Image (spheres, helix red, strand yellow):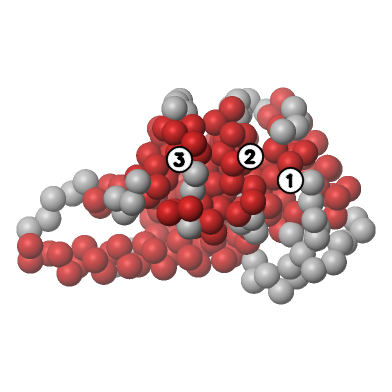
Amino acid sequence: MVSGVAVAVAVTHVLAPDLKIDNVTVALLVVAVVPWLRDLLNSIELPGGFRVEFKAVEQRIEAAERIADAALVGSGDDGPETDDPTALADVRRLAAEYLEVRRSMASGSARTQRMSGIFARLVRTTQRLADPDLDGWLTSPDGGLRLAAYARLYAVPVPDALTLLAEAVVKEPLAFNQYWGIRALDKVVDAVGVEDVPPGVVRRLEDCRPRGSDRVALLRRLITKLHGLR
């Protein structure tokens, strides 16, 4: 059976053969591709005799997602116990680098790869802060700082950030930011517990209309989970 990692790398190689594939890129690819694979498999009608094989595929996909997530977030051994005095400056530098990449590079796979690498570094760097200003970042006009907030909440889901995060995701004008904001929101929902998500948050997400198919699929799966259908 082909693993989720292999599928992700293969798809990327076909779509963008010139991209360099490193460990972080593979982790990001799997995190991005797994929901698509799950939706694809769920859309296939299989005869009853193949149900066991389908479940085995689903289990491998879920395992690949867990491995990729761990690779991206890290083990947590260097978690936010004390502030690293250089961490905030590093976050601001990465946020500025992200905005410069968006400004200076044409839209396409090369730019997405660069931005994905910055996001991965933000995931690690924001964990070096004991108490980042998530409220300030989520409401900032600076798209780089908003991405830093999504990276931190992806790595360290904080239940108290749910409402503000949901509002930021709904209003987010940058497609790359919104994608990772929805992924972070999914993790925060799990931390809160589906049954404890305020109805107002659910309604706000239902009113959200992302334009990209990847974000539409992610948000649809999250709303389905919030309605307890999954």
Residue 211 in the image: x percent, y percent? 45, 25
Q: Which element type, helix, strand or loop, lies under badge 3?
A: helix
Disc number for residue 134? 1
Callouts 3 and 2 close, C-beta under 8 Å? no
For disc 1, the neighbor class at 10 Å (few under 14, some 14 to 19, many from 20) is many
Q: Which element type, helix, strand or loop, lies under badge 2?
A: helix
Q: Quadrant of the N terminus?
A: bottom left
> Which label's residue is closer to the chain start, 2 or 1?
1
Callouts 2 and 1 close, C-beta under 8 Å? yes
Disc number for residue 30? none
Q: Disc 2 residue type? A: Leu
Q: Mark 3 sits on what residue?
A: 199
**Closest to the observer: 117 or 197?**
197
Residue 203 in the image: x percent, y percent? 44, 33
Q: Quadrant of residue 83?
A: bottom right
Q: Quadrant of the C terminus?
A: bottom left
Q: Disc 3 residue type? A: Pro
